[in-house]
Amino acid sequence: MLTNFAALEVGQHLYWQIGNIRLHGQVFLTSWILLGALLVFISLGTKKMENDPKGLQNLLEFLWDYIRDLARTQIGEKVYRDWMPFIGTLFLFVFVSNWGGALIPWRLIKLPSGELGAPTADINTTIALALLVSLSYFYAGLSNKGWRYFEYYVHPTPIMLPFKILEDFTKPLSLSFRLFGNILADELVVGVLVFLVPLILPIPVMFLGLFTSAIQALIFATLAAYYIGEAVEEHH
Amino acid sequence: MLAFNFFGATEGGLFDINATLPLMAIQVVALTYILNSLFFKPVGNVVEKREKFVSNNIIDAKNKLSEVKKLEADLLTQLQSARAEAQRIVSEAENESDKLYKEALELANNEANASKEKARQEIVSQTSAARDQLSKQADELSELIVNRLILEK
């Protein structure tokens, strides 16, 4: 029974077939549960907003302030307001996914195939997020500077052109694989340790996993904001 | 049990990319809009309203402080001028009273001198009158004595 409880299933998915397309059901299930919890939490906190914050509102305001600082330092005073919701959503989504995946004992819920876990441990999720970031910084650059955005590619010298073009591919690649790799590795390490030594020993690794999860959310949001900031920055 | 199935499987695997990707992207974009209207806008409004309130209050307080300082300086100058005025009035009054005192003293002195002189003159005149009278009486007496001596003979 215990071995069954601790069994690892890597690369197995709960497939949903809708017409011609196939989906990883476990990713959507966990993300809906976690985002539902996040939205309930936020609606509770913003239900009765007061000028003199109490309880949940205080926490949400702290979160808001944290995200604003992050967006403002990376993107700059001028346009950070437009991008703050996106950066904040990335941060909250990744953070809630990571921590939800690490804290909730999903393995108690049996699926016909695959297992529930952090949505960010699925490559589809992280690539989706990374591509959204890529689209965002292109959009931010083009909408703020028009065609002058492409000056960035030959700045400070035209020698940079191939590297800057390469960067447009490495940015989403590194963003998605960093997040995917860290969260999957954390789940695997904890899974293997639980499988080998089911008592006490995995606990420090779980704490390390929580730490990594929070850091990864911060890194993802910070890098996304940095890329957007880089795209809207004016060169002189 | 340990079912490591990284790359090989035709179905599944870690890098199985399918329609989950675009749907997840749409979900995240939708979440951005939902969070914007549920979280970022309302909380931002409250926080920025409060920040504005606080900064307005600070500006107000600074204005009031500078006003107070200005009023204080005004009062100080007023106080100084009032003090100077008072000093001036006091010294003026002192000078005036001094003058009056000196005048009165001089007047009194003069008067006293005059009455002293007058008394002296009177004394002199009365002395001389008395002396005259005395010598006249002495004359009369001596005449009477002489006459009596002559008659007795």
Image (cartoon, rainbow, N blue to C red):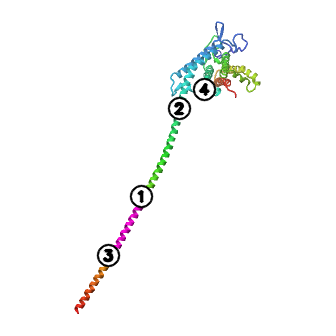
Residue kind at label 1, given as amino acid type: Ser
Give the foreground label among 2 and 1: 1
Quick check: do tags 1 and 4 share a chain? Answer: no
Camera-nearest residue between B72 and A19: B72
Quick check: do tags 3 and 4 share a chain? Answer: no
State the extent of the magenta-drawn residues as a range. Answer: B99-128
Q: Which mark is residue A68?
A: 4
What residue is pinned by disc 2? B56
User: Mark 3 or 2 closer to N-term?
Assistant: 2
In three-dimensional space, the C-alpha distance between marks 2 and 1, rounded to whole angstroms, equals: 60 Å
Residue kind at label 4, given as amino acid type: Arg
What residue is pinned by disc 3? B126
Residue kind at label 3, given as amino acid type: Gln
Camera-nearest residue between A236 and B4: A236
Q: Chain of mark 1?
A: B
Q: Is residue B123 visible?
A: yes
Q: Chain of mark 4?
A: A
Give the foreground label among 1 and 4: 1
